[in-house]
Image (cartoon, helix red, strand yellow):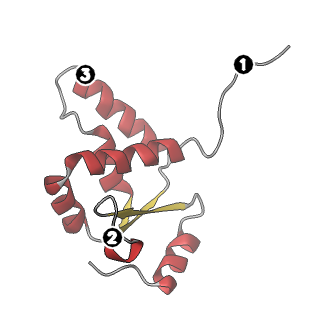
């Protein structure tokens, strides 16, 4: 699969002020050039809330246990949904990893810790 062009990547960055994530998928020891590139927008609050609802429904047996993968598909900007679905069939654990990266990105670089007072 071809990589996204620099121009197209810059356009996506400009169009998504919350940020984008680029991830490479390929064999563990492959060179970057030999990997497929996936680009996602950072999830919105509504996206994240949908992810949490999906998680809870899956615990109740009302939805498939693929909340992170579904979030990744929702936020996918490049390549096509069909390409993502093909990866989902081939390597379901990888698309879960991509989704978990997006869950982490929804924290916007913030963390919670105990105060010292």
- Vertical placement of 22 versus 88: above or below? below
In what quadrant of the picture does the N terminus appear? bottom left
Q: Residue furthest front?
A: 29
Identify residue for label 3: 59
In terms of secondary structure, where does tag 3 sit?
helix
Q: Write down the quadrant of residue 19 in the picture.
A: bottom right
Q: Nearer the viewer, mark 1 or mark 3?
A: 1
Q: Quadrant of residue 100?
A: top left
Depth-wise, is mark 2 or mark 3 nearer the camera?
2
The answer to whether residue 47 is seen in the rendering is no
x, y percentage for residue 57? 25, 26
Q: Is residue 49 above or below residue 26?
A: above
- For the residues labelled 2 and 3, the Cα–Cα distance comes to 34 Å
Select label 2 or label 1 by which is in front. Answer: 2
Label 1, secondary structure: give it. loop
Q: Which residue is mark 1?
A: 114
For this orientation, the residue located farthest to the top is 117
In the drawing, does residue 90 fall left or right of residue 11? Answer: left
- Could you tell me residue 2's position as x and y percent? 31, 81
What label sits on residue 35 in the rendered view? 2
Q: Quadrant of residue 15?
A: bottom right
Query: Dot 2: what SS?
Result: loop
Q: Residue at x 38, y 71 (%)?
A: 31
Pointer 2 or 1: first along the chain: 2
């Amino acid at each position: 699969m071809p990589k996204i062009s620099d121009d197209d990547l810059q356009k996506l960055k400009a169009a998504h002020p919350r940020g984008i994530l680029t991830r490479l998928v390929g064999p563990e020891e492959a060179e970057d050039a030999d990997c497929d590139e996936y680009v996602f927008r950072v999830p919105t609050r509504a996206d994240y809330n949908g992810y949490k609802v999906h998680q809870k429904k899956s615990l109740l047996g009302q939805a498939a246990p693929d909340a992170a993968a579904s979030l990744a598909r929702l936020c996918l900007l490049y390549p096509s949904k069909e390409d993502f679905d093909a990866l989902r069939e081939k390597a379901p654990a990888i698309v879960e990893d991509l989704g978990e990266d997006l869950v982490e990105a929804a924290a916007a670089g913030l963390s919670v810790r105990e105060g010292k007072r």
